[in-house]
Amino acid sequence: MTRSRRIAVGFALLLLLSMPATVAAVDRTTIDEPFSERNLSKVYPGADSFSEPSGQYRTVEAYRQVDGERELAGYVFLTSNVVDVEGYGNEPIEYLVSIDTDGTIRGVELVEQHEPFFDRISAIQRLRQFGYQMVGMSVTEEVTLRDAGSNEYHVDALTGASVTTRASIETVTRSARLVAREKGIVSASAIDGESANETAAANGSASERRMTLGDLGRGTALARWGVGTPPDPNASAPIQLYAAPIESDPVRQSLLGDTNASAADANATVLWIGLDAPGSPRPDRLSLHQWTRSYAPPVHETQVDGIDWSAALVVREGLDPSRPFVLGLTLDGERIRRTYAPGGLAVRRPVDAAAARALPAWVGTVESAWEDNWASAMALVLFLGGIVGVFAFRSRICRYAGMTVNRLRIGTLGVTLVFLGWYHPTQPTTQQIAILVRELISWATTGGFRWALFFSAPLVALTFICIALVIPKWGRGVFCGWICPFGALSELLYKVTPWAYELPREYHVKLEKVRYPLFVAIVIGFVVSTDLGATLAKVEPFKAAFYSSLVSDPVYIAWSAVLVVSGAFMFRPYCRYVCPLGAGLALGNVLQREPIQRYDLCGDCVKCQTDCDFQAIEDDGSIDRFQCFQCSVCVDNYYDPDGCPVVLQYDNEHGFTVDAWRDPALVERIRPEDRTTEQQRILAERAVTDGGETALYEGSDDLVPEGSVVDMVRQSAAGDEASPADTNEAADRSDDAAWPDATGGEDDA
């Protein structure tokens, strides 16, 4: 067996060992027989006996002995029998949930999950702990991830899993409310009308309670603004303003009451307005504006628990609640104007209404995630903008700043590792590309595309947006060489260790193609099954490197450790030979429109090829754009008048000037396929001025400075074909000549 085959077999064995057996995965993930006596007792520990599953949602009645009598304690149900809420894995997360006869959740146990975590054991533990947080909340309460307000119940979100967090919350709360409605614990209006909070009395008859803010928020897109000037700069706004369109007839009737219910006919638009403020918050004036029309509808005051003052506004015609509208009111002499956008987006200024009109409904589901991470998002935007700026002006940086672009890149890698790797982990993975492919297939076949999957993690979304913007111009190397946290970890580790090993080029050329079938396999795996895709994606060590608390699989940890440690001995081995994410992004390089420029002598001079640690430069001097990481070593050499033979020759003849690369004498030395549009125009103008076509640069043998790198290479090549005597003479002359420093005085490799 050849050495390359042994390496391939060894890699395949490591990958196979990193995949847990299918049976083991099922045993760790599922609860066998959810309605067994053991599992029912676990989810409802206070119950003594249980009935068989029955009814619309196959619920189990839980009983306990009270004073020798068998008394109904509550109900146990499987969420998948009640609702079907899709998580990140495009499959539902299943819980076994119990509620008591007062509508309080008594137990939550994870049954099955298909979320694309790298380590299934860690995923199960995290989802179980998350579910336990909802034990003790009422089905009429609203779950919040922030500080709990009126009729809200706080839980801590799953780290790095916004979609899974929201899917789990919706799965448990929606199913609990539906079961509570079926069993008469809460009224139908609290679920379907999404409003009135009615609880069954002890004798079995329902006694109506006043509607709460949480009831309103479940049934409509409720917007909230903080208005007014706080007395303390660090305090929150003293007034809370709420607004929501009401479309449900039961909710309208509950708000307006029997006397005013007839005021809202089927074609009328009903808007609920609420004020929560100290003192008497009754507004002096209240009006609505949409486009060029204004409305002053009648005000019907309502009673909502937790709100100081509220009213229902009935607009009989003209107002379209599916488009933004401006709410204007005067409170204690202060004029307040706020814009309500579709989906419950609370636009702060009326001038933002035009932008809000174009926002889709899913924006409201990710708004809180962006608000919670706005500072980090702004820092990332500035960081990515700085990198794009370096690429846009790197020729000037090379010529005037006195700093090579590659050294600037090394400094950038340090920021990347600390900020995007450890402080706020933002490592994109292949699974995001795979999920995108799956959503595109879903969009093409069923017309559905879940944008919220990609925008629920703000920093990852911004990174992918940057990648999409720069690939058509500079290729994927901007991310892989400058932004990728794991690439930064591997390269910096290599630079601080004393070891250096490089595979022979023949093996390098073969191994660099391994990552492409890995990428295809992971994408197909996610399309076929989330579990299969997540298992294949264990080839990526990102979770172990930056989310170490989320993994516990010893085989995966060992595989990741091998990849990290290998970076201390070899320059970025994972990035160059294994990384499926890099392979997927490299496929986008077919769109790259700005090649790295090469001179006509590139290929004869071995300087750039020697300096390129990524081995992306071919023997003819051309650059393999699918392997290029945009390290900019060759760019630094390209503009170096002390190291590049072509620029050195130009400097000797013409003198190096600011506009050197606009001089036809130098432009002619650039390979035709690498010339920019501006450079092509310069040569075309010169051809017209000279009255004929400009010939490509010829006779370079006579202009190569004696003793330069190109001269020495050519002398050596000529000596291979000469007689032994000539060869000895050439060797003597070679020994007497002083070879220039191959690094050009800069250790940028």
Image (cartoon, rainbow, N blue to C red):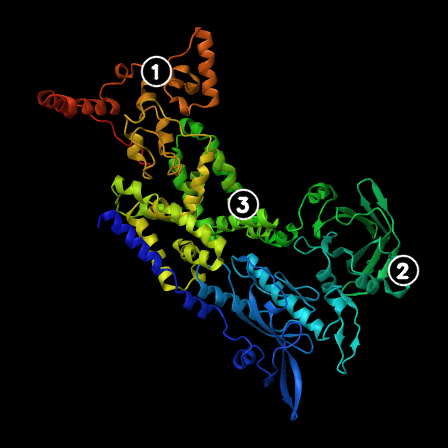
Q: Nearer the viewer, mark 2 or mark 1?
A: 2
Residue tagged 2: 262
Q: SS at mark 1?
A: loop
Q: Nearer the viewer, residue 618 or 449?
A: 449
Residue tagged 1: 697
Q: Which residue occupies the extreme bottom position in the image? A: 68
- Residue 555 placement (x, y as % from top left): 35, 62
Amino acid type at image mark 3: Leu
Q: Nearer the viewer, mark 1 or mark 3?
A: 1
Q: Which residue occupies the extreme left position in the image? A: 725
Q: Nearer the viewer, residue 461 or 568?
A: 461
- What residue is drawn where x is 67% and y is 45%? 359
Amino acid type at image mark 1: Tyr
Instruction: Tell me whether the residue at label 2 lies in contact with that at label 3, contact meaning CB atoms closer than 8 angstroms.
Output: no
Residue tagged 3: 462
- What residue is drawn where x is 43% and y is 52%? 522
On the image, which quarter does residue 253 sit in? bottom right
Residue 126: mark in rendering: none
Mark 1 to mark 3: distance in Å? 45 Å
Q: Nearer the viewer, mark 2 or mark 3?
A: 2
- Residue 331 placement (x, y as % from top left): 82, 52
Give the mark nearer the N terminus: 2 vs 3. Answer: 2
Amino acid type at image mark 2: Ser
